[in-house]
Amino acid sequence: MKKKLSLVALILIGFVFCLLPLTATAGDQIKIATWEDVNTFDPGWMTSGERELTIMSCLYNGLVKYKEGSWEIIPDLAESWDIAPDGKSVVFHLRKNVQFQKGYGEMTADDVKFSFERIINPEGKSPEKGTWKLLDKMEVIDKYTVKLVLKDKMANLFTSALPMNAGYIVSKKAVEKMGQEVFSKDPIGTGPYQLASWKPKTHVELTAFDGYWGEKPKIKKITFLPIVEDSTSETALKTGEINIGRAAAINVASFKKNSKFNVNSKPALKTYWLGMTVNKPPFDNLELRQAFRYAVNVDNIVEAAFYGTAERANTILPPGLPDYWADAPVYKQDIDKAKGLMTKAGKADGFTVHLFIPSNDAERIMAEVIKADAAKAGIEVIIEVKEIGAFNDAANKGQTDAYIQFYTSTIDPYYIMQYFGTDSWNPSQWHNAEYSNLMKQGASEVDDKKRNQIYVDAQKLNDKDCWAIWLTHGTKVWIAQDNVDIGAIYPNGRLTPWTMSFK
Amino acid sequence: MNTDTAEPIEAGLDPSQLMFKRKWADTLRVTFRAVVKVKGGLWGGIFISVMLICAIGAQWISPSDPNAQDIMHRFAGPSLDNFFGTDYLGRDIFSRIIYGCRIAVLVAFSTVSISSIVGVFLGVVSGYNEGSKLDYFVIWLFDIVRSFPQIILALAIVAVLGPSLVNVVVALAFTAFPFYGRIARAQTLSVKEADYVKAAEAMGLQPIKIILRHITPNIMAPVIVCLGMDMATMIVWESGLSFLGLGVRPPTASWGIMLRNGYKYIQTSEWMIIWPALAIALAMIAFSLFSEGLRVALDPKERER
Amino acid sequence: MLKYIIKRALWIIPTLLGVLIILFSLTYLMPGDPASAMLGPRATPELVAELNQRMHLDRSMPVRLGYYLTGVIKGDLGTSVWSGHKVRSLLAEALPHTALLAITSLGVAALIGILLGAFAAVRRDSPIGGCVTIASLLGVAVPDFVAALLLMLLFCVWIPILPALGAGAPGDPLDIALHLILPATALGIGWVGYLARLTRESMIDVLDSDYIRTAKAFAVPGKIIAYRYALKNAVIPSITVIGLGVGKLLGGAVFVEIIFSRPGLGKLIVDAVYARDFPVVQGGILVATVLFVLANLIADISYAFVDPRIQYD
């Protein structure tokens, strides 16, 4: 009896080990680890770029798009366009015979008009209506010609409004037939992939669209797996369960050394900053803000949190953006200067700062380093870790003394700079009339040189008023298995799954 | 249950002392017997004492401050400076394990105390008033709370109250009190028919005094056995809740939080997982052995084996 | 007997009512709102208000409770705030995975455990008995989520041979089985030892009892005695333990599913708590509770059937 049992056990174990190679993913499918699950597939109602934009760019096309791997604008659904001399309207000539997915017919000017006007319709409560606040209306001229009419010149029309999700074209027939709620789960676009299935918090499966008007993608099935923990992504890469994923900054080096993987890194377009709330003590005093800026050691902070994979930031915009202020001052730690400023402000004995952070590792490490360094100047930092909902709440209401925040830019500086200094998102509660003015001008200035000056001036104001200490722009690292060609990657690290293939 | 004689449930007690026994002396005596007579219980007891010493004397025993970071020496392996290595912020794991004892012991003792006191009280009172509206209400309450799978209820409560040590204790105690209640009530149902209780009633003793002096001490045996294992379970659940981020708040050093961090860095340093896992396992073994000893010491039938 | 069963079954109704009240109060009191979580840092009060309105979260508590209860009676458990999918369908997708996990771990644990325990009882003088006791102690000592972490460390990190993610490609039984190995082992480890010891002890009791001795006296072969009479009676405590164990399994499944990123009821509930997706939290806990209550009911009733020696009020 004993002998028989052990024999059976041995056979079973052997069987299992023979099956192990099967866990590697099969040929025509690529699995990609994303951070979080998506909320919606409706491009006009996108809640978070990090979560949804990559997938939306597989499902939909816009009138124009960024050429894969760069920020150059090239035609997409619009073959050509004519900009009016006053800059307040554009006529688009649409491509013919572009089919929507799942049998919803041909894309025409009606769909274009529908896609834009549903966003600016106040009843729809679209979170993207701010993007199109300068849009007056869309006029259908004929089946393949549509005119976009603006209220005023829009500087970022082609740079960040049209090529991103707010400019994607949806099927009017589909939205009207299904209703918006169902459409957000069952998207119909003209893009190279269509939605095969979405199991919330489990996976998003896309399959190649046979009727796609453009170059068909090589990979027939793309699966996005929401993986919140870096370590899970690392483990899944090593066991072969996913083809493309990420790793914690500290482990990137070991993947680089491993010949089974290829590491692609791009400087991210994020900005992490240490913000200060300027409408209450202690940081209502400019000198104390400046003191804090001299007390902390940004190089230390970035090195600790990113393990040498990221560079420090000296202004809100990442380098590589057209209006980047290259001459921004680099503040090194200077405890003496800090103490001097504190004495001038009457706080020679030090003061207390309640630093709020969300419960992410990078922020935690940064906060601890800040605390240790600030203590050298006599500033006591009390770290308040909040989970993300409570953090955003406290930050937006100005309940913090200081906070660590990050945001992701796009190619257009307006995208990130439009907040702050105004009444929309403004966690530092910083109000500056000159800054608001500059923002308004920048939004409609189409001359590159003039716009450049406007945004540089705005960044100088940030520096002068010192409402934030810039930390880093982060790095986007993608790790792919050796047999995967990861395709083109945009300068900010966004993937283009339709350009992927197996080597 | 033997109800037709006044045979005491706790062995080793002189029947003549029945009416005047004090609760605590007997409990202590039983515990002592469990520890000494049953070898497993002895080892369990020793380890628990070690945990208690670590918990109370953490400041003196631990070699470093558990929250002292050394960002430049993160993820170090075991060494003379750091017996168990360092974690993702460079903190000494050994010190954190010792301080983790403190959290474990705190959680174990406070949750078990609260839930047993509340549970036993409700159970005895309701059992003594068997059949009354109060009894039905209390049973209903017990059954409702018992219907939830315990850990799920606990995590929902902590999600409402917010993660913190106090809220973890409250949540865990809330999920556990019905168990003590049911045991207490079941025991009360039989004990209240005993001669000595009837005698006390006949003498006109107030119900509250009857409950406190005569009934409660006699029902404590199964409760005491539960206490031991329950403490172990509570330690595990606090770890679990902290692992989910719904327990103690960082940077407090609890074994559960250490496991959570270890999971996040499982590819970087296995030491962050191994030590707290070992600590939890040993604590569980210790409490299991100890409560086994208690059970054996309390059960006259077992002692014959 | 029948009276007992009916009484016992009817008692579920007021109990579940109390459960619903507590459940709804808990989710109502949970702080934070899903809109902020979804919008991230851009969550200005205006955008949050709009999102809340779109998700019908701005009505008062009694109104929402009313909607909820009428929905539950109709079988509609609401709509997920995060994804817009119906809670009912999310649960329907998640439950089979948890059930598969539970059945596999319990089944394998029971098989191994009961056999081991029987073996140890029959050969009680051999060192196997001591080994079983030690193994059972170890098994109980390592809680499921700690076991899961250690197993992941061993077989996914140090020797990356087993999958660490998900439930496997649907329709591919081999892949599914592979993905079950580690989670089921983690969940089942505690049970193997426990059931082994339980079986061993009850079998020893039974083997010593009179009617077994009589059978032996009549020269009924030893093996038959062991495996037919003693085992059957010794399985009784295991049945009831398994019945109550559904609650422990659900609790353990929560951790194992999170650690191995397996879809299932536990992961559904915890993810929903993190995202403040209240309808899913409520629906998930409700289903878990109902399952637990039913399991206890069945256990109580079957205990009554199986062991006629028990008396009831």
Image (spheres, rainbow, N blue to C red):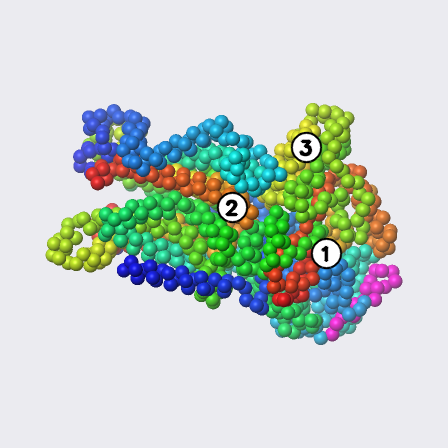
Q: Count the marks.
A: 3
Q: Nearer the viewer, residue C166 or A212?
A: C166
Q: Is residue B287 above or below residue C79?
A: above
Locate residue B3 relative to residue B59 in the image: left or right: left
Residue labelled with disc 1: A491
> Residue lying furthest left in this view?
C218
Q: Amino acid type of disc 2?
A: Glu
Query: Looking at the image, which residue is at 42% across and 55% down?
Result: C184
Instruction: Residue A133: name its quadrant.
Output: bottom right
Q: CA distance from mark 1 to mark 2?
A: 35 Å
Residue C278 placement, left or right of A356: left
Give the residue at mark 3.
A374
Decide: is A5 above or below A291. below
Asked if one can make out residue C45 in the rendered structure from this viewpoint, the answer is no
Chain under disc 1: A
Disc 2 designates what residue? B270
Would residue B89 be counted in the magenta stretch? no
Residue lying at 62% horizontally and 66% vertically, measured from the top left: A502
Lateral position of residue C292 relative to residue B3, left or right: right
Looking at the image, residue A258 lies above or below residue B60: below
Q: CA distance from mark 3 to mark 2?
A: 32 Å
Sort mark 1 into few (<14), some (14-19) or many (20+) by Cα contacts within 10 Å.
many
Label 2 secondary element: loop
**Amino acid type of the residue that numbered disc 1 sits on in the rendered structure:** Pro
Residue range in magenta is: A82-96
